[in-house]
Amino acid sequence: ALTDFLDGKIARKYNLVTNLGKFLDPIADKVLVSTALILMLAPIGEGILPFYMSIVVAVILARELMISGFRMVAASKNVILSADKSGKIKTFCQDVAILVLLVGAEFMSGIYSVVNIIGLSLLGLAGLLTIYSGANYIVKNINVLKD
């Protein structure tokens, strides 16, 4: 996630933004976040996330699939849609939540340690930001769906 952030900063600073980058960057974000969240739900020993957080994971994954489909429709019309600010904030919040939860699982005991509560809270916030950023993205680019 950190290298992805630095890559974006460098690309924008030196005007190296490309359509390929606009296409690949969100895919890399989705693979990173989706894989981590799915693995944290897996009950190997015990899953890192409590069962009720599976709803948040489902919302996050559903949004990612919807936006990917939306981008495919745009691409079929030769329109490349880059991420907007709310999506970047959502991704940052997801990445920090995952980091905190992984650290909490590795070094703290019990699902209800302070670190885990912070991580679960951040993941809940990421879920809310997911809904907002997905709706915002579609509303801002609704013209893509018009024939």
Image (cartoon, grey):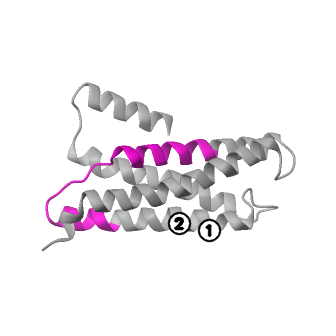
Q: Which residue is mark 1?
A: 55
Start-end of magenta stretch: 69-98
The secondary element bearing badge 2 is classed as helix
Q: Residue at the right extreme?
A: 109
| 143 relative to 87 in the view: left or right | left
Pick the residue in front: 63 or 131.
Answer: 131
* Magenta-colored stretch includes residue 82: yes
| 118 relative to 31 in the view: left or right | right
Identified at 33% across, 47% down, the residue is 84
The residue carrying pointer 2 sits among few (fewer than 14), some (14 to 19) or many (20 or more) residues within 10 Å by Cα, namely some
Q: Residue at the top extreme?
A: 14
Q: Position of residue 64 (x, y in %)?
A: 43, 62
Identified at 28% across, 49% down, the residue is 82
Query: What's under tag 1, amino acid-wise?
Result: Ile
Kindly report the distance in space between the C-alpha atoms of the residues bearing marks 1 and 2.
6 Å
The residue carrying pointer 1 sits among few (fewer than 14), some (14 to 19) or many (20 or more) residues within 10 Å by Cα, namely few
The chief SS type of the magenta part is helix
| 80 relative to 125 in the view: left or right | left
Residue 48: quadrant of the picture? bottom right
Identified at 75% across, 62% down, the residue is 50
Residue 106: quadrant of the picture? top right
Q: Is residue 99 above or below residue 135?
A: above
Pick the residue in front: 76 or 125.
Answer: 125
Q: Which residue is mark 2?
A: 59
Q: Position of residue 93 (x, y in %)?
A: 54, 44
The secondary element bearing badge 1 is classed as helix
Q: Are marks 1 and 2 in contact (CB under 8 Å)?
A: yes
Query: What's under tag 2, amino acid-wise?
Result: Val
Q: How many marks?
A: 2
Identified at 47% across, 68% down, the residue is 62
* Magenta-colored stretch includes residue 122: no
